[in-house]
Image: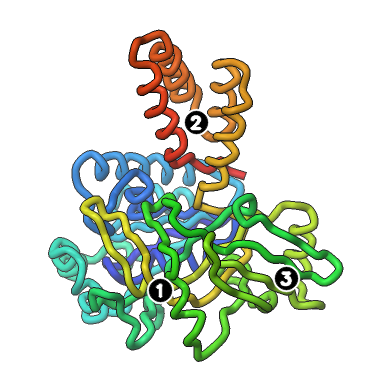
């Protein structure tokens, strides 16, 4: 196990470096990602209760990693203070120093909150002492790439995003002899775990006007493992048919995982070219510039899991059985018990039909947590 502590100024590309280097099952402790998972709708601009919760979660995650885990870990720590550095040294971490230069960082921060620009200036005024102490050499050539000319509907530079769809939602069809599979890589009108909705027609333009084909990759940052034979929109979403490359070592592993049912889904890599954002920061993606579609292990979109939970609840014979279904889906014991108790109480009230319908809607819309594998 190697613990990598990634330090450097804001907007240096620390998170991107960690994501690109982290392997499957590796732990990445990133404050921004934790804040988003806890409900933040604004990237790099977190305040109030979410900020306190994210900081607490980050501290707990770091402490757990330092106590020892089985896999490699990446801790994003912009400016570790001496006490943190001592803890890192005791755990024999590897320090990674990312610094493309102040000018580059400020350029990337020009569309972020003013506090980010101030944080960059403060970092360069008082950089972490561990840099000089350990004579760390910066990775200067690494930077977050924005494709020249790629700007969204607001004129902002676009970066590649990913959205995942579970195998259950793909309705996957698989021909093991030919190494071919087909199904949905994306569905319309659902709300994913980031609050985004993909509108029908979002892929129309990108499928018609292409300078190069859409790549088939393994887990986004892995190698090209095959080619897409068909790709089109229908009323449900983006339907694809692909073939894995014969004789390719990684493709052979993917083929074996597909046969075994161990692959969790497909994920699109894309630029959000046109979208509308509501007052809560949720986006309706109206035009997507598709870059690649990956076969993946760990989906983030929970639409299929919600569908399975709804079906199981409809077949349940008792409230106790419903409680167990919710726990299996990812609710903790307290949350599952509380919800079932509330349903039971409402069932005995005069407003039961109306209130139960509301709760049913909440169950349908809730973003179920993904259990670790």
- Percent across and percent down for residue 173 are 73, 60
Earlier in the chain: of badge 3 and badge 2, it is 3
Label 1 Cα neighbours within 10 Å, binned few <14 / some 14-19 / many ≥20: many
Furthest residue in direction top, as rendered = 348
Furthest residue in direction right, as rendered = 177
Between the residue at mark 3 and the residue at mark 2, the CA separation in whole angstroms equals 35 Å
- Percent across and percent down for residue 319 are 55, 16
**For the C terminus, which image quadrant?**
top right
Furthest residue in direction bottom, as rendered = 211
Quickly name the residue at label 2: 331
**Observer able to see residue 337:** yes
Between the residue at mark 3 and the residue at mark 1, the CA separation in whole angstroms equals 26 Å
Q: Residue at x 75, y 59 (%)?
A: 258
* Left or right for 221, reference 12: right
- Percent across and percent down for residue 318 are 59, 15
**Observer able to see residue 135:** no
Tell which of 204 and 362 is nearer to you: 204
Tell which of 293 and 131 is nearer to you: 293
Quickly name the residue at label 3: 250
Q: Residue at x 41, y 63 (%)?
A: 199
Residue 271: give its label.
Answer: 1
């Amino acid at each position: 196990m190697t613990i990598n502590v990634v330090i450097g100024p804001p907007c240096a590309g620390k998170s991107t470096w960690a994501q690109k280097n982290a392997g499957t099952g590796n732990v990445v402790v990133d404050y921004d990602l934790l804040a988003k998972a806890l409900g933040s709708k604004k990237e790099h601009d977190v305040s109030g209760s979410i900020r306190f919760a994210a900081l607490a979660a980050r501290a707990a995650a770091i402490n757990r990693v330092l106590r020892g885990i089985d896999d490699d870990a990446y801790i994003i720590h912009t400016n570790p203070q001496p006490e943190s550095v001592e803890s890192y040294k005791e755990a024999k971490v590897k320090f990674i120093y990312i610094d493309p230069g102040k000018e580059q960082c400020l350029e990337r921060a020009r569309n972020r909150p003013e506090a980010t620009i101030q944080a960059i200036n403060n970092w360069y005024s008082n950089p972490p002492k561990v840099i000089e102490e350990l004579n760390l050499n910066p990775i200067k050539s690494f930077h977050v790439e924005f494709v020249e000319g790629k700007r969204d509907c607001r004129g902002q530079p676009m970066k590649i995003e990913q959205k995942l769809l579970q195998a259950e939602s793909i309705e996957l069809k698989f021909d093991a002899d030919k190494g071919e599979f087909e199904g949905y890589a994306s569905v319309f009108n659902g709300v994913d775990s980031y609050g985004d909705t993909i509108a029908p027609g979002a892929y129309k333009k990108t499928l018609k006007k292409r300078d190069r084909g859409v790549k088939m990759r393994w887990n986004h940052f892995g190698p090209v493992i095959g080619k897409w034979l068909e790709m089109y929109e229908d009323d449900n979403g983006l339907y694809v048919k692909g073939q894995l490359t014969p004789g390719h070592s990684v493709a052979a592993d993917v083929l074996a995982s597909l046969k075994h049912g161990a692959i969790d889904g497909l994920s699109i890599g894309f630029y959000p070219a046109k979208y509308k954002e509501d007052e809560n920061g949720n986006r309706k993606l109206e035009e997507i510039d598709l870059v690649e579609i990956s076969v993946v292990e760990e989906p983030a979109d929970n639409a299929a899991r919600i569908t399975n939970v709804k079906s199981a609840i409809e077949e349940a014979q008792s409230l106790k059985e419903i409680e167990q279904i919710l726990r299996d889906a990812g609710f903790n014991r307290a949350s599952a018990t509380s919800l079932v108790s509330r349903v039971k109480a409402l069932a005995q009230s005069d407003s039961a039909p109306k209130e139960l319908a509301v709760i049913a809607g909440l169950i349908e819309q809730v973003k179920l947590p993904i259990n670790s594998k």
